[in-house]
Image (cartoon, rainbow, N blue to C red):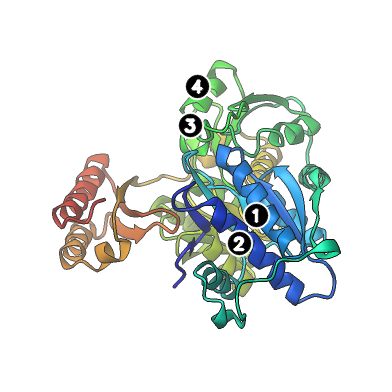
Amino acid sequence: MLKYFGTDGFRGEAGTTLTAEHAFKIGRFLGWYYSANSEKTPKIAIGKDTRRSSYMFEYAIASGICSSGADAYMLHVTTTPSVSYVVSHEDFDCGIMISASHNKFSDNGIKLVNSSGEKMEEEVLEQIELYLDGEFSVLGLDGDIEYQTGEKIGRIIDFSEGRNRYVGYLISLSLFSYKGFRVALDCANGASWAIAKSVFDALGAATFTLATSPDGTNINKLCGSTDTSHLRRFVVENRCDIGFAFDGDADRCIAVDENGREVDGDKLLYILALEARRRGELVNDTVVTTVMSNYGLHAALEREGINHEITSVGDKYIWENMVKTGNSLGGESSGHIIFKKYATTGDGILTAIKTMEAVISSKSTLSALAAPVQMLAQKTVNVKVSDKRAVMENPRVKAAVEKISAELEGHGRVLLRKSGTEPVIRIMTESESDAVCSESCEYIRKIIEEEGLIK
């Protein structure tokens, strides 16, 4: 089991859990690792979101990379999927994204992708963790990694052109002009603020943007995919046809229909699955979902004769399923949606493009396309804990989950799971009633509190 890296990178409070020293050492290890396995100077791409600490981590990582003899290519403020795209199309050894995604600004993270633009192999992450903990001998080193000197020191290279190529790629994927459509984009004061509007303008939309004034501390603050209230009001007041909200690094997308109602990742998956099948692009007639997907999505897909497979939470596990089975579409209710034909990770702007494709080709509205998905009431309570494993293994907590599961059987469910990116346990319940969901979550939360496990 990994110590620092979760399902979506090494994440934590900047300056405490994740420090500039961590960043420097990760860069130093990667420069050494790829230099040792190549006769040419390694190329490593670095992107970042708009958090204040992202700049600190960017320079720390780049310094580490160069000190080990590799070259650091700076994409500057850009999205997570753009890093994956650039790395897989521009002959890079690996890529780094500095972001804590949807988390508050004081958190940050380091995400690593391999030369194919996919999440870094676990065996490499394990070696990085050994290095961070000073286990040099286990890595076959006599001591710390040697600093390079003279001409062997790596270079830092501006590579903003890579980000521009990604924008061009997104534009090329659209099958339609958006002329005549009024589209609102909430960029979460994050990585998409300088990218999303360029794409939609180029495709002909009358584009309106929100949360595009990042100041280092306002990323995801009362905006973006985790808080669509402002976007929902904006769409109605400005008579927009549709709205899209991205998270801090733009690998998620939540939509808003013309009536100002939120259309989450589950409903988008349904719409996108039908459109993909109509175009003959839904491999195996199957959609990959996660344990957090609402039963309403599964029921709607089954009515259409579309299969679904269920994975653990995280686009990492969705992608692993897609690689193994060939399935072409998968995602989460949070708005992480992967189109295997076009990307190796969730891509919020790509999801928005594909949703526009479904709306335009159907000559319908987003509200009409989403209507067949009748969701069960669902509630998720996040509980900050000191030891996630202790909670999951606690006898009273397990008994509480079993009790609620028995009560909801046949008309709902309960799920207790560990967050892969935070010191949090998530309690999720589904039922025909909001009140029952709330009561069930609170019952389990109270048991966790009584056991002294809440931080």
In front: label 3 or label 2: 2
Q: Quadrant of the N terminus?
A: bottom left
Whichever of callouts 1 and 2 sits on the residue coming sooner in the sequence is 2
Q: Which mark is residue 233?
A: 4
| Element class at badge 2 | helix
Whichever of callouts 3 and 2 sits on the residue coming sooner in the sequence is 2
Image mark count? 4
Circles 1, 2 touching at the beta carbon (< 8 Å): yes
Q: What is the x, y in percent for residue 108?
A: 52, 47
- Give the residue number, with chain letter if any, for mark 1: 61
Circles 2, 4 touching at the beta carbon (< 8 Å): no
Quarter of image, res 192: top right
| Element class at badge 3 | loop
Whichever of callouts 4 and 1 sits on the residue coming sooner in the sequence is 1
| Element class at badge 1 | helix
Residue drawn 59% across the image and 17% down it: 238
> 23 or 290: which is nearer to us?
23
How far separated are the C-alphas under marks 3 and 1? 27 Å
Circles 3, 4 touching at the beta carbon (< 8 Å): no
| Element class at badge 4 | helix
How far separated are the C-alphas under marks 1 and 2? 7 Å
In front: label 3 or label 1: 1
Q: Specify the farthest residue to the top.
A: 237
Amino acid identity at mark 4 = Arg
Left or right: where 310 falls relative to 90: left
Quarter of image, res 66: bottom right
